[in-house]
Image: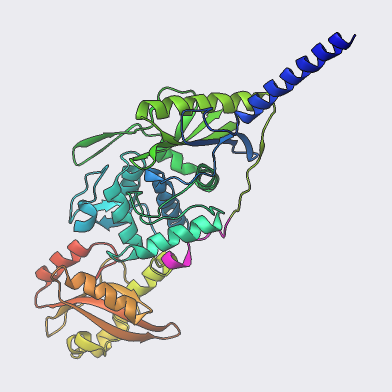
Amino acid sequence: MRTQSRVFFLTMLLVMLGATSVHAATRSAGALRAKSAIAMDLASGRILYEQNADEQIPPASLTKVLTLYLAFEAVQEKRLSLTDPVLVTPEAAVAGGSRMNIRSGERVIVREIMKGIAVASGNDACVALAQHLSASEDFHPFVAAMNAKAHELGMADTVFKNPNGMPADGQLTTARDMLKLSASYLRRFPQALTFHSMTTYVHNNHNHHNANRLLTSYEGVDGLKTGYVRASGYNNVVTAKRGETRVVAVVLGARSAGARAAVTQQLLDIAFKTLGKGESIAVLDEQKGRGKLPLALAQAAPRQQDRDLRAAQVLADSKVGQLQQALAGEPDQAAAEDAKPASALLRRKVAQGAYAIQESSFQSRQRAERRAQHLEKKGLPVQVVAARLDGKGKYYRVLVGPYTNVAEARKTERMLGHGSVLVE
């Protein structure tokens, strides 16, 4: 009898140890051949698997999910349009690593820039977009907005240093934090998958292939983003939908591109199997955030209605600087035309034949001066003039010119493109 009891006890102990080891496999290192991993059911927020999910690792190009997040947020708030042209600066054009192959001086619309980020993983495209939204070659406002948004979403163990994930001291994230970001991104901007599901993209005769191998090899996968830097290894955020169920999975630190795809596939298999059994580990602790573009970037990127207002008020103050002289001969006509809204181009013929272009307008003189300095580096004649608009406060206009003939002014106006207005 005593022998039977001992056998029963040992049997139960082995069963318990076996069950413990199975459960621990969902949390402990070594279960998957990657540094860390986590998977979740998007609808419920239930965690289906995790392994070292709070280990800090450089994000590499997974950073670009947040860059696109902010771009979609700016579009949603009408501070950015998918058809806005982005001027490619020399700094953007020479960005290293994976590239979209944009060229200095080229103008590329936002939609194409976003495709270049999502599919080609363009570091150059990220810099161009960050500079465009920051209204400056200095994209620190964009990076500040990235970290503000990460804080809003509860990404407590993440710090961003640049918009593309290129190696930078102190730039770190975790699998859990990337899951929080990706979940919010997919819920708020499901249209983003239109870009992330593209397998190829061509720009300037360069054909780019999406590094997400599972797009064509795993049932239901339709995004998101891959990444690699030496310090982290091969990273991946993937989403797959089967029926009404969508799973989001994060793998950080795989040993190769092939291993990354294999481990991610294994993680998705585990996630869908766990869901089928109705099991889960926990619920992701998520924060929704403000749902608005962070202030650091909102100040640099005015709403469309504000841009329209500025365009409509290009000639509102005819007594300032060069415009005062240009309009002195025809004050009545000037007053009448100032009352009309301006679209892309305002024309007025004056006796003096002087032309200027309003490139931008700000409520802060400091920001206007910074923009003027940026344009001066391009060899353009620039001046900042102040104007008080009725009921709208004071604005500081960045004017390019004067030019003595309209052909020369038009040439510069076409080069400036978005937001510029020719005033004669």
Camera-side residue of 253 and 264: 253
Measured from the top left, where is residue 189 in percent x and y?
Answer: 50, 46
- The count of marks equals 0
Q: Residue at x 18, y 50 (%)?
A: 103
- In screen coordinates, is 154 left or right of 412? right
Q: Residue at x 62, y 37 (%)?
A: 47
Measured from the top left, where is residue 188 in percent x and y?
Answer: 53, 48
Measured from the top left, where is residue 256 in percent x and y?
Answer: 36, 30
Numbered range of the magenta stretch: 289-297
Asked which quadrant contains residue 356, the reply is bottom left
Asked which quadrant contains residue 169, the reply is bottom left
Residue located farthest toward the right when viewing the structure as drawn: 1
Q: Report the quarter where the C terminus lies.
A: bottom left
Residue located farthest toward the front when viewing the structure as drawn: 2
Asked which quadrant contains residue 209, the reply is top left
Camera-side residue of 371 and 251: 251
Measured from the top left, where is residue 7 in percent x and y?
Answer: 80, 11
**Does the stretch in magenta take in 39?**
no
Camera-side residue of 417 and 274: 274
Q: Is residue 214 visible?
A: no
Q: Is residue 165 visible?
A: yes
Q: Residue at x 19, y 42 (%)?
A: 204
Q: Residue at x 59, y 38 (%)?
A: 42
Q: What color scheme is it?
A: rainbow
Classified by dominant secondary structure, the portion drawn in magenta counts as loop
Does residue 282 sit above or below 265 in this rendering?
below
Q: Report the quarter where the N terminus lies.
A: top right
**Does the stretch in magenta take in 293?**
yes
